[in-house]
Each structure stands twice: as structure tokens, then as C-alpha cells.
Image (spheres, rainbow, N blue to C red):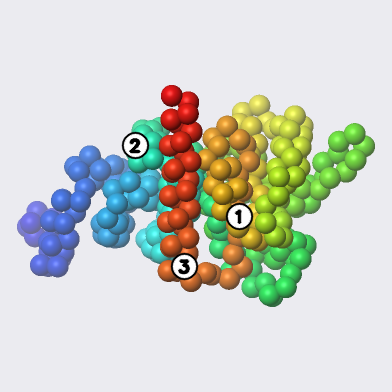
């Protein structure tokens, strides 16, 4: 091997090669090479036991061009468990990930999350929605990094006029991969049903007045400072709804407590998903 491929074949590296052969199929290794995932990417991915979770991170690495440091950070922050796709039954997750891999594109349920970590904003213990919005604009690069790499900033306090009444949308972004405007509304406290009605008004306005011919319909994200789990899970799972709801954390939560909360949330969502599927049958 040294004669054919050059030096560097230590016992440690050979052990990783053997492990990778057991972990990945030949097709997966070829896919990783084709999408420019390097040996360090594969070594990190090998540490993920669940094959669907491992496939998710591999797909996100390819789509969003993550370096290995970003991959480590996303795994540590339990990104997969925070996405809408993780709430679905395993066979549905596999089907959607396979489709994303074949088409080389992302879907909204791979992008939007049940919670976001906004600790980079360094907000005080008591703050207003205006303080939050200002801090996001100040730290927009870090905020976009938490949202996902394909988001681009469009506007702040976007004026929306309906029947001579002015409304102001907190933040407007565009997602290049999804080809959709993303309206973001910031809320203190828990999600309320009237928030959904307000967001629908914004989205219908954007769809009629701001959407380009080549874009898909706009999508909305309501970020709340407190989580009411069932409301969030049900709206995340409704694929027909253009609205996603998530909780944001201005300080990183305890990892063990977060892991337990996400585990319970996924269980609730999958039970709800299975119940709806059975009712349709």
C-alpha cells in the first residue's frame, strides 16, 4: 500500500480503514468521495451508531459544504434530533433521505428545527423582542450559521401593507437551496394560535407581491422564547403548512436535559404521526 498510495499507513489508520469498511457500503464511500467528504469527515461519521442519523449528517455535509469542525459542532449540538425529519417513522426518514441524496437537494424538514441556540447574541436575562432583533442583526453571520448555511439576509422590519394597515415582519431571509423566502417572526413567551394567523397574512402578502417566478412559495418560522412542545411538534409535522414553530435558547441548555427533552419530543411526534397515518388508512 505504501508503494501504491504513499506513506502514512500506521496501524491506527489501518484500523480505521477496516472500521469504515464495516460501517459504510462501497456506494456510500463512493458518494462521500464524489461529494468531497474527506477522511476526517468519514472518521467522525463512523462514530454515529444510528445509520439514518449518519446518513442525515453526510447529506448535510455535502449540501451545505461543512468542514469537519462544523460537522463536529452540529453533532455535538444534536442537530438531527432538532430537525423535523427526525420526528418521522424510520421508513419515512430513509425514503426522504434517499430522495434528497438522489436529487442532491434539501427539503424543508431537513432545514428547519424545533429549537435554535442563540447564545452568540449575549443577551441579558431580561430583554425585549426589539433587543433580540437588534442583537440578531448585529450578529447576523453567527445567526445565519445557526439557521443553516444557505440563508441570505433580505430585510429587517419589512413593511407589509394590507387594506391601508401597515404590519412589520421582524426578519426576512431567502434560502438558496429551497428557493424560498423565509419570514421570521420573533416572540417572547409561548406560541399562541394567533401567531399562526399573523404569519399566514405575511406569507400570503409575500407570495403575491414579493415572490419571483422561479421561486417556490414563501415559508414562515415563528421563534418563541418558551416551548410548548405539542404545539411545536404538531406544526413541525404538518407538511402542508408553510409555517414552522421553534423555541430559541439565548443560553445553551444542559446537554443531558436537552437530550432527554428531544427524546421525549421525538416520541410524541412519532406517535402523533403514526396515529394520523392509521386514521387515514
Using the rendered view, name the quadrant where residue 3 is placed: bottom left
Residue 119 falls left or right of residue 129: left
Q: Which mark is residue 91?
A: 2
Which residue is drawn at the image coordinates 92% and 37% (left, top)? 164
Residue 149 image offset from top left, x and y in percent: 52, 52
Which residue occupies the foreground of this view, 58 or 126?
126
Of pointers 3 and 2, the one earlier in the residue sequence = 2
Q: Residue furthest top?
A: 281
Asked if one can make out residue 252 in the rendered structure from this viewpoint, the answer is: yes
Give the label, 1 or 2, closer to the camera.
1
Cβ atoms under marks 3 and 2 closer than 8 Å: no
Residue 246 falls left or right of residue 89: right
Where disc 1 sits, the SS reads loop
Residue 208 falls left or right of residue 30: right
Using the rendered view, name the quadrant where residue 260 is placed: bottom left
Q: Which mark is residue 228?
A: 1
Cβ atoms under marks 3 and 1 closer than 8 Å: no
Residue with the mark numbered 3: 257
Classify 10 Å Cα crowding around label 1: few (below 14), some (14-19), many (20 and above).
Answer: some
Question: How far is mark 3 from mark 1, CA to CA?
Answer: 16 Å
Where disc 3 sits, the SS reads helix
Which residue is drawn at the image coordinates 56% and 43% (left, top)? 234
Classify 10 Å Cα crowding around label 3: few (below 14), some (14-19), many (20 and above).
Answer: few
Classify 10 Å Cα crowding around label 2: few (below 14), some (14-19), many (20 and above).
Answer: few
Task: Indicate the quadrant containing the N terminus: top left, top right, bottom left or bottom right.
Answer: bottom left
Where disc 2 sits, the SS reads helix
Question: How far is mark 1 from mark 2, CA to CA?
Answer: 27 Å
Residue 153 image offset from top left, x and y in percent: 66, 50
Asked if one can make out residue 97 in the rendered structure from this viewpoint, the answer is: no
Amino acid at each position: 500500500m505504501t508503494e501504491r498510495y504513499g506513506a502514512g499507513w500506521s496501524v491506527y489508520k489501518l484500523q480505521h480503514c477496516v472500521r469504515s469498511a464495516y460501517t459504510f457500503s462501497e456506494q456510500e464511500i463512493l458518494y462521500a468521495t464524489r461529494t468531497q467528504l474527506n477522511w476526517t469527515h468519514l472518521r467522525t461519521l463512523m462514530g454515529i451508531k444510528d445509520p439514518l442519523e449518519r446518513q442525515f449528517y453526510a447529506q448535510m455535509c455535502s449540501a451545505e459544504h461543512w468542514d469537519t469542525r462544523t460537522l463536529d459542532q452540529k453533532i455535538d449540538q444534536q442537530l438531527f434530533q432538532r430537525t423535523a425529519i427526525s420526528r418521522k417513522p424510520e421508513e419515512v426518514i430513509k425514503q426522504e433521505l434517499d430522495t434528497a441524496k438522489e436529487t442532491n437537494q434539501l427539503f424543508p424538514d431537513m432545514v428547519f428545527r424545533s429549537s435554535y441556540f442563540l447564545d452568540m447574541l449575549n443577551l441579558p436575562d431580561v430583554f425585549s423582542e426589539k433587543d433580540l432583533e437588534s442583537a440578531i442583526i448585529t450578529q447576523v453571520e453567527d445567526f445565519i450559521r445557526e439557521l443553516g448555511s444557505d440563508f441570505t439576509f433580505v430585510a429587517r422590519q419589512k413593511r407589509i401593507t394590507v387594506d391601508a394597515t401597515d404590519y412589520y415582519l421582524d426578519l426576512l431571509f431567502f434560502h438558496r437551496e429551497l428557493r424560498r423566502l423565509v419570514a421570521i417572526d420573533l416572540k417572547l413567551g409561548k406560541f399562541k394560535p394567533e401567531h399562526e394567523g399573523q404569519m399566514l397574512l405575511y406569507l400570503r402578502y409575500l407570495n403575491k407581491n414579493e415572490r419571483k417566478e422561479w421561486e417556490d412559495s414563501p415559508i414562515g418560522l415563528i421563534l418563541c422564547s418558551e416551548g410548548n412542545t405539542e404545539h411545536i411538534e404538531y406544526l413541525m409535522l404538518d407538511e402542508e403548512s408553510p409555517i414552522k414553530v421553534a423555541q430559541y435558547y439565548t443560553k445553551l441548555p444542559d446537554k443531558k436535559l436537552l437530550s432527554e427533552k428531544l427524546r421525549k419530543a421525538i416520541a410524541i411526534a412519532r406517535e402523533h404521526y403514526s396515529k394520523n397515518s392509521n386514521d387515514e388508512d
